[in-house]
Image (tube, rainbow, N blue to C red):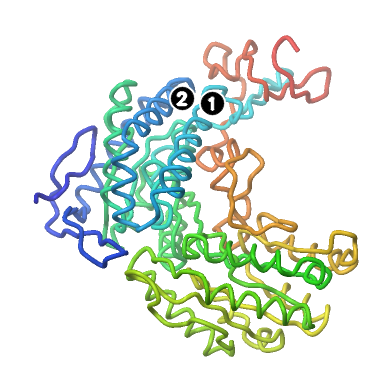
């Protein structure tokens, strides 16, 4: 079987690089037949040059042009749904239904269409007009963007189809999609649809491009290339920090989703009131998708007591009884087992699981560990190691003081949850805990596990470092996610006919700010 081509400068072409790779079926550990190239630097540079030329062409285009592309792309994805689901199932072992076909694929097309609506309305630009001083400002496109997708969401976060891709395009930027090595055939099928959509909506050749893999050195050169506008990355902390260092040195914006253990705090009244219900919620959340969600509850914080003992006993039983799911790759199995060993070496006691096996293909037994708050406080760094998979760590505090001390040591996370008694028994303790946890997380939840991430304008899928590289980051939620791939553009004393349409006096953008009678008003023309 021949090596699959790369999409560069509007053409599918054979890679010039000698290195290739294959994906593996995680459920069988068998190598899949399709062979893919590792792109050399000359090929990567060609993609950047082409994207830069495309950026010049589309720089002044109205948002409706990008909306047309995004909607056409969503339509073409739906036409290829069966092939995409088949490929992703083979490459990730994620279930066809309900995960891929019924959940992730509709989410992907839905967020593309949300991005299209935002691009067309142009309200994300936040046009600001000061006629008295002759100054106007808006958000505009950043320039070529490269998107690195993760292994755990082959559709909704894919470098060529996911949320970062949709946001970057909605802002008017050409995108180079970097496929993940675990699901290259899935990425190729998406790229075929994206290429067709680009052709049918008359996009310039370098507007949408895709490469499958680079070496680490070339990946760093890519994000720091003088012609690149910015980068979106979802994946492991180590590789992400290498990319961040390279981008920072070159002064390039880089938006990273890196690592999160998503602490869940179960207050005593809640456990006494509905401990069995919470145990079921937690087990379902932690084991969903074999725990391979960036919002997986990796730490549970509890106060010592009878209700806590009963909760732990119940969840250990649920973990032992539940089927062991398949992990996404051999690397995922290795990372999970090594993470469990790290927690144990730092003082955590193993309650159940901890060994490879128990299911099909790459897998590790459902795992729970426990550590006292005092032992955690003695080694908070190692005991906050992200153990990505079907595992979680209980921290048992003897007092509210210990509980708060533990929260103060937490690194930044995507989410934090607090369960409390419904009649107010826990309110006093909640008022002490919540402000501390609020500063450590991007999204604070009450009485709800963190694994669901709604595609809503109000959603924040971000958080303080190391959850992401910037506390203003969100990779989900339009229009906020679009602004990452934009620059603030100011026009001072520019003649009216030279202004972008959205900054002209007759624009009808709903979210346009105007200085009227000395006061700023968020009104559109005619209101």
Establish if 155 lies above or below 280: above
Q: Residues within 10 Å of mark 1 (few under 14, many from 20)?
A: many
The residue positioned 72% from the left and 79% from the top of the image is: 310
The residue at the far front in this view is 321
* Residue 371 falls left or right of residue 118: right
Badges 1 and 2: C-beta atoms under 8 Å apart?
A: yes
Q: Earlier in the sequence, mark 1 or mark 2?
A: 2
Establish if 201 lies above or below 84: above
* Residue 96 falls left or right of residue 498: left
Quarter assignment of residue 399? bottom right
Q: Position of residue 44 (x, y in %)?
A: 25, 48
The residue positioned 39% from the left and 26% from the top of the image is: 69
Q: Which mark is residue 314?
A: none
Q: Position of residue 414 (x, y in %)?
A: 61, 59
Indicate the secondary structure of the residue bearing disc 1.
Answer: helix
Nearer to me, 38 or 369: 369
Establish if 62 lies above or below 144: above
Indicate the secondary structure of the residue bearing disc 2.
Answer: helix
Nearer to me, 473 or 248: 473
Q: Which residue is mark 2?
A: 67
The residue positioned 58% from the left and 49% from the top of the image is: 453
Position of the C terminus by quadrant: top right
Q: Residues within 10 Å of mark 2 (few under 14, many from 20)?
A: many
The residue positioned 68% from the left and 62% from the top of the image is: 416
Q: Position of residue 292 (x, y in %)?
A: 47, 62
Q: Which mark is residue 117?
A: 1
Q: Position of residue 422 (x, y in %)?
A: 85, 59
Task: Quote the CA–CA distance across marks 1 and 2.
Answer: 7 Å
């Amino acid at each position: 079987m021949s090596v699959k081509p790369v999409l560069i400068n509007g053409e599918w072409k054979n890679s010039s690089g000698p290195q290739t790779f294959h994906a593996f079926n995680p459920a069988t550990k068998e190598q899949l037949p399709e062979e893919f190239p590792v792109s050399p630097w000359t090929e990567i540079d060609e993609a950047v040059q082409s994207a830069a030329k495309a950026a010049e062409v589309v720089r002044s285009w109205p948002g409706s042009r990008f909306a047309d592309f995004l909607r056409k792309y969503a339509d073409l994805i739906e036409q290829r749904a069966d092939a995409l689901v088949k490929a992703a199932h083979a490459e990730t072992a994620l279930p066809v239904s309900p995960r891929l076909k019924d959940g992730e694929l509709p989410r992907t097309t839905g967020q593309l269409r949300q991005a299209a609506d935002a691009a067309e309305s142009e309200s994300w630009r936040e046009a600001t007009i000061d006629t008295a001083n002759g100054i106007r400002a808006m958000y505009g496109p950043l320039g070529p963007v490269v998107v690195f997708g993760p292994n755990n969401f082959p559709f909704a976060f894919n470098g060529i189809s996911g949320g970062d891709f949709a946001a970057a395009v909605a802002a008017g930027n050409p995108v180079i999609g970097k496929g993940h090595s675990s699901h290259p055939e899935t990425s190729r099928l998406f790229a075929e649809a994206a290429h067709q959509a680009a052709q049918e909506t008359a996009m310039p050749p370098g507007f949408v491009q895709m490469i499958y893999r680079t070496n680490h050195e070339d990946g760093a050169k890519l994000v720091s290339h003088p012609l690149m506008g910015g980068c979106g990355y979802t994946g492991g902390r180590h590789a992400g920090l290498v990319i961040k260092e390279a981008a920072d040195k070159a002064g390039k914006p880089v938006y990273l989703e890196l690592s999160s253990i998503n602490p869940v705090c179960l207050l005593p009244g809640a456990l006494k009131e509905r401990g069995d219900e919470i145990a079921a919620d937690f087990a379902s959340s932690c084991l969903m998708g074999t725990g391979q969600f960036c919002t997986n509850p990796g730490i549970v914080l509890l106060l010592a007591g009878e209700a806590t003992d009963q909760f732990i006993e119940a969840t250990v039983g649920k973990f032992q009884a539940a089927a062991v799911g398949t992990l996404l790759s051999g690397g995922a199995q290795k990372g999970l087992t090594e993470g469990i060993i790290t927690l144990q070496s730092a003082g955590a006691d193993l309650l159940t699981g901890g060994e490879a096996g128990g299911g099909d293909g790459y897998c590790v037994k459902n795992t729970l560990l426990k550590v006292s708050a005092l032992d955690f406080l003695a080694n908070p760094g190692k005991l906050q190691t992200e153990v990505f998979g079907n595992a979680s760590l209980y921290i048992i505090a003897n007092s509210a003081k210990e509980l708060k001390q533990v929260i103060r040591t937490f690194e930044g996370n995507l989410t934090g949850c607090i369960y409390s008694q419904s009649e107010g028994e826990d309110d006093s303790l909640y008022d002490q805990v919540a402000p501390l946890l609020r500063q450590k997380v991007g999204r604070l939840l009450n009485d709800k596990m963190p694994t669901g991430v709604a595609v809503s304008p109000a959603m924040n899928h971000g958080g303080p470092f190391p959850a992401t590289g910037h506390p203003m980051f969100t990779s989900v939620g339009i229009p906020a996610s679009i602004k990452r791939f934009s620059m603030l553009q100011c026009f001072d004393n520019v003649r009216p006919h030279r202004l972008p349409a959205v900054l002209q006096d007759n624009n009808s953008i709903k979210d346009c700010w105007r200085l009227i009678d000395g006061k700023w008003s968020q009104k559109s023309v005619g209101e």
